[in-house]
Image (spheres, rainbow, N blue to C red):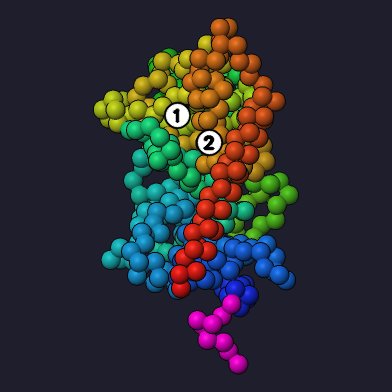
Amino acid sequence: MEPAVDRMGEDDWRCVMDHVLPDNQLAARLAFTKMSRAASKQLPGFRAGVRTQTRVVSTLRSEALREWAASVGSPSPFPHWVELHSLARASYNGRIGRALGPPNDKGRVPVQLDGGLGELEPASKPIALRPDNLHPLVCLDTELVYAVRLKSGSIGPGNWSEVSVPRRHSCFAREQHTNQLSGFGYDELGVTNSLNWSLAFKTTDELMAAQGTTGELFPEGRLFFTRYMNTISGLTTGPPDGPSRQLSRHTILSGKPLSAVNAEPIAGARWALVQRPPLLAACGVNLALQRVSRPHSLDRMAMTNQPACFLMLDPHTGFAPPNQMDGIGDAYVYQAKSSGPAAHFRLRDFEHIWDWVMGDLGAGEGLGPEGGYTLSEQAFAKSRQRFFKSRAREAEGESNVAGSFFEQFESCD
């Protein structure tokens, strides 16, 4: 005999939640308060909480969730990352891109391709492709990795957001290549950072034209780009022993070297403006800061990005370089690794760094000969431990307050 819904206890709701499909769990929790509360509690005979297993762009996979999202005015799942396959133009197969919107009147989706030079927000013109040729990238274990986007214009956590980036995006391949040319010690990063600055926002045509001239690019810059072009096809952006995963008409190339075709920059691709924060490198943390706005392309206040500026503080002086103090615009921060799979960089990781810079480092005043703060992996690790312990205590306090509220609410029924 099935119990009436209004008489179902927490253990009954827990059993129901265990059988809800992963892509529908978020909708179920939002729709049924009792189910959400039961799934979150430790009950006798059950494990400690049912984990909500939502996927990135889950609305693409679940018709029920898509209908529910539309009914409550949820935003569209676009844009989202895709991998191209089964195209007649073989040079595009296996490339990464971003589906910008739903199919047009002709049934084709506008897709902006990864240009091959590391740009996370390329300026190239989108191409129109059939949905059958696009594989949505949704899995955070094998296909996507977390990064943090720093929006310019105002100061505060409201302008920081957690975003996903394909593990096989050329921004990670670029890091593997450039790491081979320079160490990660903060004293060695100046050369690579200045080279990246000299190449930034130049198109493939402009870069190739400078190879045999004495134009803008100085000799080291031309060699830097030439070596990148010659060796990127041999790099890998996945686990070297990771198995391929067979899908319909398509194989995800996770763990396998990028092919020469996929690594070749497309026409109009621009060299991404990527800088490596020497401040974090001195503490054993390898990050990449990618600026996606051309310097001073908007008014001064709209281009202000204090977090990006503070990431580039010089460990010796406590000041950022002149080109990092103004006119920055939007930026991304992600893990920079010399080999192996790309790694997550979460919003909480950046929040700790911000707390550390503003607190322990005094916004840079604690650095330099007069500051007295010594950068080290140990000191950074201790600050991280303190930060997350503090966060855990805050979360526990909020949980206790919420629990007290629900108990009072239930007592009124």
User: Could you tell me if the residues under marks 2 and 1 are in contact, i.e. CB atoms within 8 Å?
Assistant: yes
Say if residue 227 shows up in the picture: no
Q: State the residue position of label 1.
A: 307
Quadrant that contains the N terminus: bottom right
Which of the 4 quarters of the picture holds residue 203?
top left
- Say which amino acid is labelled 2: Phe
Q: State the residue position of label 2.
A: 350
Q: Position of residue 103 (x, y in %)?
A: 34, 63
Crowding around mark 1 (Cα neighbors within 10 Å: few <14, some 14 to 19, many 20+) is: many
Q: Residue at x 42, y 64 (%)?
A: 131
Asked if the magenta segment contains residue 3, the reply would be: yes
Which of the 4 quarters of the picture holds residue 228?
top right
Towards the viewer: 101 or 220: 101
The Cα–Cα distance between marks 2 and 1, rounded to whole angstroms, is: 9 Å
Residue 350 position (above or below residue 377): below
Towards the viewer: 221 or 55: 55
Q: Which mark is residue 290?
A: none
Say if residue 322 shows up in the picture: yes
Q: Element under label 1?
A: helix
What stretch of residues is rendered in magenta?
Answer: 1-9
Count of all numbered marks drawn on residues in the image = 2
Q: Residue at x 43, y 51 (%)?
A: 98
Q: Residue at x 40, y 63 (%)?
A: 130
- Say which amino acid is labelled 1: Pro
Residue 259 position (above or below residue 134): above
Query: Most extreme residue toward the top, as rendered?
Result: 369
